[in-house]
Amino acid sequence: MSSCKSNLRRATVLLLASVLLTTFAYAQSPATQAPDKAALAAEKAQMEALGHKYKTATELFEALRAQAHGGKALTVDTMPNWSGIYTRTKGGTAFDPDGPPQGKPPLAKFTPEYQAMMVKDVTNRAKGIEYDPLSACHSPTYPRWFDLPFMREFIVLPNQTTMIAEAFNSIRRIYTDGRGHLSKDDQFPTETGDSIGFWDGDRLIVHTNSSMAHMYERAQGFYSDQVEGVEIWHKVDANTLVANVWIYDPPALLEPWYTRQSYSKLDDADKTLRINNWSCKGNSNNEVYETKEGGSQHAEFTFMKKNGTQEKSK
Amino acid sequence: MKSVAIATGVATALWVLSPVYGHHSASMFEPTKTVTISGTVKEFQYTNPHSWLIVDVRNADGTVTTWGFEAEGPSTLMRAGIRKSDLSPGTKLTITGHPMRDGRPAATWINATRADGKILNPHPKEPAGTTPKE
């Protein structure tokens, strides 16, 4: 009986989420109209409730797949047009674009251990002490991928969607050909994780696991190597791609962290924009090391003498 | 004439215009101070993850100090309308940035004005709805 009620509650939440997503999509016309705050708040509350209904990312993903009756494979004729060059719509590099700005504690419900790590980082940042492993060209990994700055591309094909972030040449491949993840015993961590997905109309639903532990961003908290995510991607108007994202990470999060990630297409009328290979170590003036205090410092500059004095000449 | 000016405590408005540091923390720079120098471009290193504008500054005693101004990489500069040819060697300019805390002659690039009056702000306009960067 309680199982019946539980299933009914889950079905209701899924139905509400579905209605909300559909309503929200239609509410975006005309193309440049920004969603109002009340609609965003209502959406966030519904999406958070949806995440709380499921204990794991796999459970949420499978519920969404069941709701979509397994999803429908794309064809060349039904592929949505996500072409162009995009960048993050808002939020700077804070993981939650709708949360506090970077430098203030994010709204995620961290476990005590990870909460302490986050608070230490925020406190040190306020003192000017901060180091990011990206300085040594470490991969940002997943889910930090969502808040990377600079440009992005989304390449949709029937059996695979490829998501490219310019920063650190971070490429995600979402397999939509019906394959599953590797079996638990065969899984291994990779820099952008292992992603599978399916299409529900023009929405792409994704499940990602097998990533590596890292930070959400500087002073934004940390995730473990058990982090997983569920995403619903949708192009809400001619220039905006939105991803509803739920992050599950039992060692680090007491409950899933829902965020609404958004990416805006850049004007490229004069065809000057281009994404080049990100050569992280191509200029030695960009070499940064971690100080004994845990801060960041530039190494010696090529435009200065090696003894650290300024180059002076008559 | 000395071409270096340091300002303190007037940088609040400029700080929000500082780059999004996608590669490293900006903690080695002093966010509440700005430095403004006038000099001649020695080299424009148009590179990822950061570009560096190398500028020679002639001091009052006749010596030359070489400064480096850090900005984001080529794609961000292109979006801001700054091309490599805009700052070829020999170009004269005045440039403002947040200086390094350790006193070395380097800074984040906030804004620059060439001798011909062209303004070179390396921070592109973001899409509508973008909040101020860190």
Image (cartoon, coloured by chain):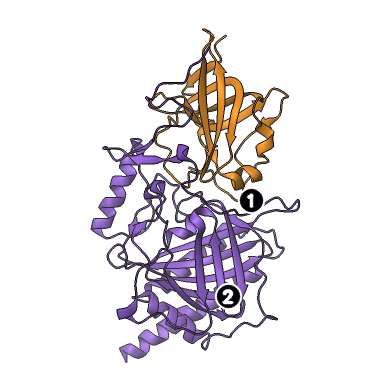
The kind of residue on which mark 2 rests is Arg
Residue lying at 51% horizontally and 23% vertically, measured from the top left: B66
Relative to B115, does residue A164 appear above or below in the rendering?
A: below
Front residue of A279/B72: it is A279
Q: Is residue A97 visible?
A: no
**Label 2 sits on residue:** A203
Q: Nearer the viewer, mark 1 or mark 2?
A: 2
Q: Is residue A278 visible?
A: yes
Residue lying at 35% horizontally and 54% vertically, measured from the top left: A221
Instruction: Kindly give the residue lying farthest to the right in the view shown.
Output: A270
Element at label 1? loop
x%, y% of residue A28? 66, 65
Subunit of mark 1?
B
Subunit of mark 2?
A
Horizontal side, residue B25 vs residue A110: left or right? right
Horizontal side, residue A172 vs residue A238: left or right? left
Task: Tell me which chain appears purple.
Answer: A
The kind of residue on which mark 1 rests is Ala
Front residue of A127/A139: it is A139
Disc 1 from disc 2: Cα separation = 24 Å
Circle 1 residues within 10 Å: few <14, some 14–19, many ≥20: few
**Label 1 sits on residue:** B128
Q: Colour of chain B?
A: orange
Q: Dividing the picture into quarters, in which one does residue A29 lie? A: bottom right
Instruction: Kindly give the residue lying farthest to the left in the view shown.
Output: A113
Circle 2 residues within 10 Å: few <14, some 14–19, many ≥20: some
Residue lying at 61% horizontally and 54% vertically, measured from the top left: A275
Element at label 2? strand
